Image (cartoon, coloured by chain):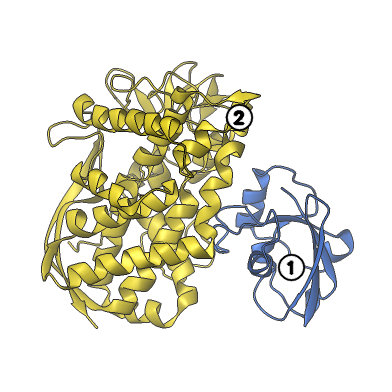
Amino acid sequence: MSASYFSDAFKDTRETMGTCPFNDQNDPVTMLLRFKDVRKTAHNTKSFSSAAKPGRIVVPSEVNIRETRQIPFEVDPPEHTEYRALVEDWFKRPLDIDYEFKLTRIVEAEIDRVLQKGAIEAISELSLPIQSKALTLLLNISLSEAETWISWGTHVFRSEDSDLDADKASILYDYIDAEIDKAIAAPDDSLYSVLLNSEYQGRKMTKEEVKGVLILTFAGGRDTVINYLTNTITYLAEHPEAIEKLNDNPALVNTAIEEFVRYFSPLTHMGRVVKEEKEISGHIAKEDTRVSLCWASANRDESIFENANEIVLDRKMNPHVAFGFGAHKCLGATHARQLMKVFLRVLTEKVSSIEIIDAVENIEDWGAHKRKVGFDKLTIRLNAK
Amino acid sequence: MAKITYITKAGEEIQLEANSGSLMELAVKHKVAGIDGDCGGVCSCATCHVHVAPEFYQKLDAPTEIESDMLEFDDNVTEYSRLCCQIPISAAVDGITVNVAN
């Protein structure tokens, strides 16, 4: 099987049942698999809440490793609307020319560095450094800070043995606490200081609220971006003609990034807690139970996407939900899309071909369904133009 | 060359001209407030929602099911709502006025 092939793990269940149960730490989740169910449920924030106990809407649940509420992610409207409005402009900065320019310099430097090296392990030597260095732009802090995050390894919450590792998670939480204290002592123009100065409901944001936004920013855009970059590399390795096509046709890059993110769906699903009983594709969602919006399954729904299991670089209509849907759609999507564009542009400009030397797949276990989401290891060689 | 008028939520009137691309691409290029075009025009984000002037709405090709489904879930939907990434610029839209919805 080729490295860039990601099967439609939920196909049969989506088509026959529409939902499937997953037992997550004795707080079961019903996964919603159909595109229309996923969108409708994501839109209905009144019946399907994000404001449960912190960590509960995440699957696997993080209630045992986190007390801080992620903001605006774990808040419902109308409070969500005000929090989101506070941070919306900041998270659109990636559209500025200057931001795009700096991001391009970062990606160019990283690709130039690995082109000198011969064979590399793509996740630790390319995807993680690019993700971390790009994040310094989103936070508007010194590029050198990325070295600390790179040293944490690829997973903020996970260790080799466990999906949920409290010791690892505390590294991030303690780090953010310390950085917030630094910004209080010496205010600057970083996201920390901007948030500390923001007003919510007529008062300054608390440290705990600021921490909630920062945890979301760090955790939400780490594994997802790393998997996106790594998976895209495997596609280009196995479709060398796409490298030239993308390099010659800048407009194709726009549709290609949307198609890659649909096909790879780096975040498999996200939960909600039921507030008002509803029926979804035959499943009676009872109050205080959990459902999850399975973006990965919805993005392969053949009733919506023609040739859903193929990567069509110039797909014109692509209503994917890889960045979620509705009020809670991914806050970091503008940053992610800019990085995806810059990465494709720079890579296809500098690289003529990519060889895959060794690939160890990362398979998620959702009970009856096993889904490939990326790689644990990917050894490659980039050949310069 | 088609003349397009965008009216933002703040009431600012912006007149632009072009002969290709989409109404979304033109608006993004000129930073029309409220039209972000996050997904680049593949109908995935609904950040280019406009209300088309009634006299022009009927002249446009009807929205596809995918576009209609996207609009169904957006705020401030009216019978003249369109995602302007799906409105190509041509002589047919010369003189059109659209109000930014969000």
* Number of marks in picture: 2
Instruction: Where is residue A203? Give x, y as percent.
Output: 61, 23
Q: Which residue is mark 1?
A: B61
Can the viewer see residue A136 in this picture? yes
Specify the colour of chain B. blue
- Tell me: residue A126, above or below residue A75: below
Three-letter residue code for mark 2: Glu
Q: Which chain is yellow?
A: A
Q: Which residue is mark 2?
A: A199
Where is the N terminus of chain B found, in terms of image quarters? bottom right
- A42 displayed left or right of B99: left
Q: Which mark is residue A65?
A: none
Q: Quadrant of residue A112?
A: bottom left
Can the viewer see residue A259 in this picture? no
Instruction: Where is residue B21? Give x, y as percent.
Output: 64, 75
The residue sitting at 80% across, 50% down in the picture is B10
- The residue tagged with tag 2: helix, strand or loop? strand
Three-letter residue code for mark 1: Asp
- B20 displayed left or right of A195: right
The residue sitting at 39% across, 67% down in the picture is A104
Q: Quadrant of residue A175?
A: top left
Chain under numbered label 1: B
Q: Point out the residue furthest to the right here.
A: B55
- Tell me: residue A142, above or below residue A14: below
Instruction: Where is residue A353? Give x, y as percent.
Output: 22, 77
The residue sitting at 62% across, 33% down in the picture is A81
Mark 1, mark 2: which one is toward the viewer? 2
- A339 displayed left or right of A358: right
Q: Nearer the viewer, residue B52 or B101?
A: B101
- The residue tagged with tag 1: helix, strand or loop? loop
